Image: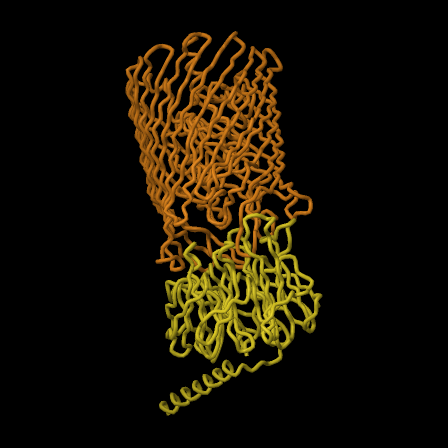
Chain colours: A yellow, B orange
Amino acid sequence: MKQFTKLSVLALACLSLAACEKDETNNPDPVIPGAPTAAQGIYALTEGQFYSGIPGGLDVITFAPAKIENNVFSRTNGRSIGDTPQCGVAYGSKIYVGTSESNTIEILDRFTWKSIMQIRLADITEGGQPYSMVADHGKVFVSLFGGNLARLDTLTLSIDKVVAVGPNPDHIALYNDKIYVPISDGMNYPNYGRTAVVVNPKTMAIEKTFDTYLNPREFFVVGGRLFLLCMGDYSAANPSQLFEVDAQYGLRKICNATIAAPYGRNIAIINQPFVQNEEDAVLEYKLYDLNSGTLSDWEIERPDYANNMHYDAEADRMMISSYVMNGKYPSYEKPGYVNVYKSQERTPESKFNLGSAGRVAFFTLTK
Amino acid sequence: MSADTTRLAEVSVVGVGRKTDIKSAVPVHTLNRKKIATQGISDISEALRRLPGVNLRDYGGAGGMKTVSVRGLGSQHTGVAYDGVPLSDIQSGQIDLSRYSIDNIEALNITVGDNDNIFTPARTQISATTLNIAVNRPAAVIESPFILYGKVRVGSFGLISPSFRTSVGNGCNLGMNLNGDFIHADNNYPFTIRNGQHEEREKRHNSGINSGHLEWNGVWKPTATSFLSSKIYTYLSDRHLPGPVVYYNPESNEDLKESNIFGQFIYRLEANEKWSVSALAKYSFSRTHYTDRNAIYPGGLLDNLYRQAEEYASASILYRPIYSLQISYSSDLWHNSLRSNAADDSAPFRNSFLQSVSLKWTNARLTIIGRGLFSIISDRSRQSDGSKNFNRLSPSFSLSYRILKDANLNIRASYKEIMRMPTFSELYFDHYGSISLKPENTRQFNVGTTFATNAGSLLEEISFIADVYYNLISNKIVAMPYNMFLMTMTNLGKVHAVGSDIALSLGFRVHPQHRLDFNLSYSYQRAASRTERNMSDWNKQLPYTPLNSGGGALSWLNPWLNVALHATAASGRYSTTLNIPSTRIGGYVDCGLALFREFRFGKTKLEGRIEANNLLDKTYELVGRYPMPGRNFSASISLNL
């Protein structure tokens, strides 16, 4: 009887684990009010401004009805999500948020926004500080600015593997079942990095290291093609540029760019390089057509001072986050806003005020 | 009083006290050794908060950096002088006052504008306000046949601080002294952090400090009307920096090692009743080594090493054509350089040449002072094309008038214009700095009244100082976002500050052996950004500037056990220029109690003190996310032979 009981418990545990596995890997997307599906809405993570004591937060934007819920984590849990929220993914029934100053990954319920668990990365690795996340096959992959790529198992809600990838890995992307990691070496001014690595997500082994342009910052995939945004060294000689990465890991320059994001069959590009003198200031909005390989002006009603953008293909909405202006300068202290553009329209369909200040990291439900 | 004695008092910058504060044509507030002892002041942070108009930024604990700004002008507008000779930090433009131990300080005084003594180096006039830390009086060094003073102070959070002072003089024309202090503190004090609806009790980590200072002074008076003084000063510190409190992450691995050595000579001669001359030479070298161990840095270590050097010379002449009139001319020249271990070290240096002409007319009731300061400053670095020069004429005026012949009731008014040169960090630090910066300009207006009397049997002593002011800053150097990744320095801001400083001191002789002293200081500061009307920070209170602040002490001096109850307080402040509600730092009241008694055995004096600070154990912050210590205690014993 005792043995039977043990076996029953084991069987139940296996069943429940299998159910969890299915839940996480197949991503059932129950329609529950307040928890947007990919086509319904988007999560906007504001980083705040740590050194001025301004906390960041998690906002949830839905398109139908059009509304924003500000600071859902702190309102639900009665505490801060952590200092400098930097990245997140919504995956399965949970949301995973990485904070770089607090060096945590906060795991919360996607439907109730209640905290399930907080992982303190200092307890796991010396090289922490989450910077970007992607999710796939029941795992969340997190680039850690301290030089690592971590893998979080969504069943056990624990980090099951950490691999050293190089100094200051930045925004990662999944492409052809591999993780592409830009090694920015961004803390090594002026000798920034010029490499990226390709990691096998199953073994977490580095399979390839290849050369890039100076200060690689962000990989992204659009139309089955891989692109890389590199920041250069903020000088006129080595400006921030966008490249396409070919099958042989060669880079083909598209144009100068400081922000870039997929936009249907285009790449939306904003170029606002650092200049020493205000009279030399440049601000360009461009579209790069993936089919024709041509650049054209992106004729939209521009926000005040864009700091990021994100296109939700299912909802066919482009979102551009912006600082509000303080005179002729952007304010890093005041909460900014998000302009939502429907389809290819020039004027924003709606404008949402964010709950906190700072740059925005967008994410939607990962399918 | 002989003419010679009068002249020595003129050259001293230490012997300032209530008389100077009351008679001065510009606001002067002084805490001398006696006041420091009787008002229960246990460290320099506490002392600075008792001075009206002073706004202290304290990063907490015995090792926390401490800087002061006065009347909303910013800490870089506060010059700091040590025994009357300016200190400098060309990199940051502000002096960390935590390195000066209260144990060896004779007096602290803050002067807003130019003080009444016009026979000073031109460089003493380049700041809007000056904090003078007085340690040695040349006359006192000579007059002391032999002094040996030792003190040991122990306290909460691992504090142990011995200090000593020894002085020997022939009582005639030669004297020297040696003084030093050492401080060790763990500083791992508990604090309460509020996180939304939750409160958590935590401890500061990585906060320990070991620092020490050793100083030698020599004075030689070859004739009755001249003297030569010299000083060699050394300072060493090794401290861990806890950094700001971060939610869920107590880890900090920052360290700061600092050293500073300087030597100086001052020569003064009163050639006759009409002519005096003075010369000064100084060399200073400082080294700052900051490290932060964190995997995000190359090799897991951020290693910043900075070396500063300064060579400084000054010559001054004073002419008294008639008894009521003094005319002085001073010419100063100095060179600052900064080197670092950064790959892109731009090795900047600055040559500064100042000339000032001052006139002072005084009689029994009226004092009028006018000054003109002409500055020629030249910067050069590897980044800049050739040198960059700034020339500026900066005037100042002040007057005081004794309203009634038989009562020490005065009114005063002053005006001062001055520029503040950009610091090397503001000019050259990576992308943050901007080599196109221009100097900040300040204009200060002040009117006030002072009153003092020693009359009365019960109310033995009363002094009252009240000033109102209006300050303007233009071309204020501020950090502005330049694109979404970087901020850079620019001359953008304008600031208007209006306010009032009040100091009241009452001394009651309630019994021949019992005295009650009551001291109160209060400041109102409305310092607001007035850059452009369409900017969000228009008319918003400057960060870290409380509208109301002050301090007070009630001391009962008696033959049994002296008692001092004291408090400092400030209203709420913001850490942001836009006064974002979530960045409001709450007001505070910090109360303390000191019990002390002196025992005399012949010429030997023994004093014991017990002090309690932050009696109410309130967690409060002077800088956001840097909590101050809660209730803490210290005890000290000092022996004076």
State the quadrant of the C terminus of chain B: top left
Q: Position of residue A81 (x, y in %)?
A: 52, 63
Residue A235 vertical position relative to residue A299 in the rendered view, above or below: above
Q: Is residue B567 visible?
A: no
Q: Nearer the viewer, residue A336 or B7?
A: A336
Q: Residue at x 60, y 52 (%)?
A: A281
Q: Nearer the viewer, residue A282 or B431?
A: A282
Q: Nearer the viewer, residue B83 or A303?
A: A303
Q: Position of residue B132 (x, y in %)?
A: 45, 28
Give left or right: position of B389 versus B259.
Answer: right
State the quadrant of the N terminus of chain B: top left
Give left or right: position of A211 versus A96.
Answer: left
Give left or right: position of A73 versus A204.
Answer: right
Numbered marks: total: 0
Q: Is residue A215 visible?
A: yes
Residue A81 vertical position relative to residue B516 in the rendered view, above or below: below
Q: Position of residue B482 (x, y in %)?
A: 56, 51
Give left or right: position of A301 versus B193.
Answer: right
Q: Position of residue B222 (x, y in %)?
A: 32, 13
Q: Nearer the viewer, residue B520 or A187?
A: A187
